[in-house]
Amino acid sequence: MLRFICLFLLYSGAIAELPCTVMPGKLKQLDAGNGEVYGVADNDTIYLWHANQWARIEGRLIHVTVGPAGVWGVNKENYIYRLNNFNWIQVSGRLKQIDAGGNKFLSGANSNDDIYCLNQDATTSPATSLPYVQIDGKLKHYACGPFGCWGVNSANEIYYRNQVTPNACHGTSWTRVDGSLIMVEVGTDGSVFGVNADGSVYKRVGICPKNPRGTSWIQIDVCNGFKYVSHDSGFLWLISHNGNVFRCEYADSMLSDLL
């Protein structure tokens, strides 16, 4: 694994070092949460980062997620699976993108950009026929965390879903957020990161329980163009346009030193 130093660049012009490591292998999508990292390769094979290497897991998926709601994924036909003792169990429904980052509730979007979620009681049940709740609107990517849910639509507009709870995952209404992103991810700690159409990586700052939408975006320059980002346990996990995987040390203390 190649280790190097990239630049962390804020709009204010402040610069600090952001250590990154090029990880082995190539992936098209990954998700970090609850201290674990899962990813899928171009041929839909599934991997878990374990003991400093990628461990192959049975099955084939196009999108995988890990978080408080467990480990879930969807295959190329958009069928949904839940991981149980390293066995994939098919459940009802079809989604193209799925997220387990909520407080034991699930969210995602289907091939028509329709938005769905599962309340906490459904994700913790062993049942395979699940009572999905449809949410108004259209999104291509929808992700949740402890302070709420974020999504982007086909025009790369960013939205925040208000008053989402584990037992009312549909929330109440949408608030448009400034900026433009092709995807957005919410960490287990509530941090929000996204990637724009140019491959630049951004973080939402100012997020807290009293202000769950935060205040502004800052750009993180990590020496490459990226198509996917996830964050957990002090690390940014990034996928470049050619599939290379980067793990960058990133802690909020680094940000507070700069602001």
Image (tube, rainbow, N blue to C red):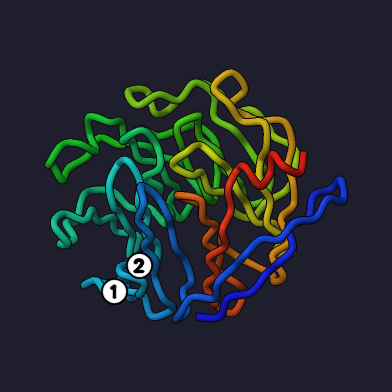
Percent from the top left, x then y, of residue 234? 51, 51
Residue pointed to by mark 1: 55
Residue pointed to by mark 2: 49
Q: What amino acid is found at the position of numbered circle 1 in the picture?
A: Ala
Instruction: State the residue at coordinates (39%, 37%).
Output: 102
Percent from the top left, x then y, of residue 91? 20, 50
Dot 1: few (<14), some (14–19), or many (≥20) neighbours within 10 Å?
Answer: few
Percent from the top left, x then y, of residue 150? 55, 38
Q: Residue furthest right?
A: 13
| 139, above or below 198, in the image | above
Camera-nearest residue between 29 and 108: 29
Instruction: State the residue at coordinates (51%, 37%).
Output: 190
Percent from the top left, x then y, of residue 57? 24, 71
CA distance separating discs 1 and 2: 6 Å
Instruction: State the residue at coordinates (36%, 62%).
Output: 38
Residue 134: name its quadrant: top left
| 153, above or below 168, in the image | below
Q: What amino acid is found at the position of numbered circle 2 in the picture?
A: Trp
